[in-house]
Amino acid sequence: MADLNLIKRNVKKLKLDSYVIRLIRTNIEQIRFSNNLVDLRNYWTREGISIFLNSGKKITEISLDNDSNIEEKIEKSYRSMIKGEESNTFNGINPEKYSSIEKIEEQEKSVELDDIVNACVEGAREGGSERSTGLAYRTYTDDHIITPFNEHHVTYDDFNFDIRAFRGQNTGQEGVHFSSSAKDPVEIAKKAGMEAGKTASLIVPSIEFEAGNFETLLSPYVIGNIFTYCSSLFSAYSVQMGMSYLDESLGNRVASESLTLSDSPLNKHGSNYTVFDDEGTPCFNKNLITHGVLENFVHSYSTAVTSGTKTTGNAGIISPEPLQLSMESGNRSVEDLLHSIDHGLYIKNAWYTRFQDNRNAVFSTVPRDGIFKVENGEIAGRISGVRISDSFGKIIKNISGVSSELKNVKFWEEVSPSIMASVLVQDLHVTKAF
């Protein structure tokens, strides 16, 4: 176990303007299940130490997995930093002192991971699946940060799981995250299992598909995948480096009026609930897009100084990022959105997202586990072998409907957990994947 006092003493010996010492220790419980039965349990602990040092505009960062030879490692990195070049973008870490931070409340009764798995499997059966498989995790995180200006210490307890349901050759899949403070976590798990089972057991014919532009209902899993992959567009660092097409758009309309998108690190029901950033600045919720208008970028102290504004509590010391993207719910049910489609698609999830143009967020992603053709407001058949090939900017401008239901989604390759709605998009470009 790392000795933070030892690390701090060694850091304070050096001639520095500031430093950040962060120790994150996680205890992880994992359950794997297949054919409706638990077949593997794992428990492990991870401990990561990161140390950021700066003298003027010279900076270095050290990552350690234990505290052996810590004095030598710190001294070696410091000497390399002093001999190195200055950073053109670094303006220091946040010097403001904070007396307290918001913390998650302790729960009187906490659900067990077995309860989550059992609820998933039961829900999938009730939804019509023959069998289900998946992974579930419970993670206890102890997060301790020390700077010359602040010291914070907080613990988190969260869950996430993926379940894939099968009926014959058909599949359905759901992936959910939540913290221990979420309401009715067992019911959340059962509902996700049931949805996966319903997708797998939907009896419709397999039909041929021709590429084109379609009115498409995208589930929260597809939207979560796309939005989290594109989240760096809202980073002030990306804007300053010319890596975001939104760089001249602050205060302008960039999306449909139906879209309000926020960074919500203090949403305690999500597993990315976060109370301080990498500089020890308290986090807070803020809108990024409000009814289609770009309202904020996210900032560290350095990017804020460059832009003449204030940090938003989103460091990455160098490159800030949104912490937990969240959509504002709409006023239409998923069924209403589906029934409004005359000729289009309903896509339940997607993965293997890859970019052809990062600045303009031009990407492709491969749907699976529930891709349906829709005719006259009804699901007419299953299709396969498709690829969404479009851009983030076009998609958010073409949103014509947002569901009233939100889901906490974290599906395999998604960059981070998010809280998303189902979204109806006009003119989505869909091609054949093979």
Image: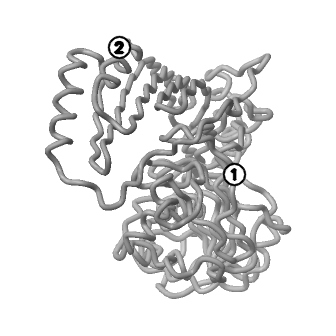
State the residue in front, 108 or 331.
108
- Image location of residue 117, percent across then percent down: 62, 28
Q: Residue at x 66, y 28 (%)?
A: 116
- Residue 357 x %, y %: 36, 76
Query: Which residue is farthest right?
Result: 331
In this view, the mark in front (2 or 1)? 2
Position of residue 418 measured from the top left corner of the image (x, y, whole percent): 61, 51
The quadrant holding residue 434 is bottom left
Please indicate, yes or no, whether residue 241 appears anywhere in the rendered image: yes
207 above or below 279?
Answer: below
Q: How is the image coloured?
A: one colour
Left or right: where does residue 168 sit relative to residue 291? left
Say what amino acid the circle numbered 1 marks: Asn
Which residue is at 69% across, 45% downward? 128
Q: Residue at x 62, y 66 (%)?
A: 296
The residue where tag 2 is placed is 6
- Disc 1 element: loop
Residue assigned mark 1: 285
CA separation, marks 2 and 1?
A: 35 Å
Label for residue 160?
Answer: none
Q: Is residue 81 above or below residue 42?
A: below
Horizontal side of 39 relative to 407 (left or right) equals left
Quadrant where the N terminus is found in the figure: top left
Q: Residue at x 39, y 23 (%)?
A: 46
Tell me: residue 3, above or below residue 301: above
Residue 367 seen in this snapshot: no
| Kind of residue at badge 2 | Leu
- Of the numbered discs 2 and 1, the one sitting upstream in the chain is 2
